Image: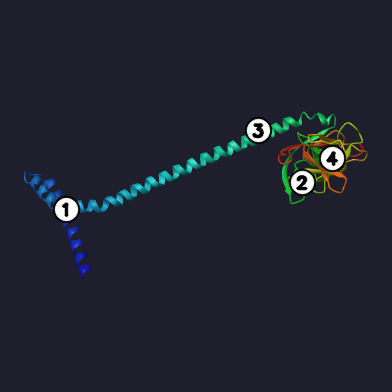
Amino acid sequence: MARARHSRRTTFTVVALVLASLTILTVNARGGSSASGIRGFFQDVTHPFVAGARTVLRPIGNFMAGSVNYGQLRDENARLRYSLGKLQQQAAINSISSAQLTQVLALEHLSFVGSTPTVMARTIDIGRSNFTATIMLDKGRSSGVLVGMPVVGSGGLVGSVVATSAHSATVRLLTDASSAVSVAFGTMTTDQAIAHGEGPGAALTLLYLPTGTPITKGSLLLTSGLQGGVYPSGIPVGTVMSSSSVAGAGGVDVIVQPAADLSNLGFVDVLQWTAGS
């Protein structure tokens, strides 16, 4: 009942406002001295209704305006985030390009390569587990890259090619647990040892050198180039970091830091050299 009465009052109010509006329009159209008075009367009568309507509608208008502004703000924020993302991406690209350019330029001036022909290649994949360490290059047999060829970076020896396809090659790094390189040190040609890989990110080791071997911290190790070896002579392999005596074995274990930065191999050179050549 209460709802019905409220509905009837609301309907009456709307009808009254409509009739009042029509009356004002009629008086305005006819003109006359009483027009202003009638307009004033109806303004007084309808003022509470108009004010109430404005009070009710104002939050709705504010909400609609806020919605429009919110949408504009959201779009602007999206544009700003996109622009910031592009700038950050470009900065990263510029940084990578600069680092790669440095590597490429360094590969053009490798004194230890001598007159050996080379194929410059880019690293396109890295394969690592607990013990294996390999990279994949974007050059293969079609570019003259063959299994067994040595691979070098700007600092020295990286590893050797162990598999190829027409347009790619897999390189086993020095740090791979199955890697072993014959190295020479000191001034005597008989001062030689085998550098073993210990897994990705680990240093190389020289195991069980005889006590008194003239090898000290800072010594540079080079490929020995033994007859039938997998590498030509004179390529830097690494630098001695430390040495320690092995109790009861009468020997010395040596830890070697690889000469090439094996964690940052954007570009490398494949030496077109094979054992016995």
The alpha-carbon separation of the residues under discs 4 and 1 comes to: 96 Å
The alpha-carbon separation of the residues under discs 3 and 2 comes to: 24 Å
The image quarter in which residue 135 lies: top right
Q: Amino acid at mark 1?
A: Pro
Mark 4 element type: loop
Label 2 belongs to which residue?
A: 134
Which label sits in the foreground, 3 or 1? 3
Label 1 belongs to which residue?
A: 48
- Disc with the residue nearer the chain's start (4 vs 2): 2
* Crowd rating for badge 4 (residues with CA inside 10 Å; few <14, some 14–19, many 20+): many
In this rendering, does residue 147 appear at all?
no
The alpha-carbon separation of the residues under discs 3 and 1 comes to: 74 Å
Q: Amino acid at mark 2?
A: Thr
Q: Do tag 4 and tag 3 residues touch (Cβ < 8 Å)?
A: no
Q: Position of residue 218 (x, y in %)?
A: 78, 34
Label 4 belongs to which residue?
A: 149
Q: Position of residue 56 (x, y in %)?
A: 25, 54
The image quarter in which residue 95 lies: top right
Mark 2 element type: strand
* Crowd rating for badge 1 (residues with CA inside 10 Å; few <14, some 14–19, many 20+): few
In this rendering, does residue 150 appear at all?
yes
Label 3 belongs to which residue?
A: 98
The alpha-carbon separation of the residues under discs 2 and 1 comes to: 85 Å
Q: Residue at x 56, y 39 (%)?
A: 88
- Disc with the residue nearer the chain's start (4 vs 3): 3
Mark 1 element type: helix
Q: Residue at x 46, y 43 (%)?
A: 77
- Disc with the residue nearer the chain's start (3 vs 2): 3
The image quarter in which residue 234 lies: top right
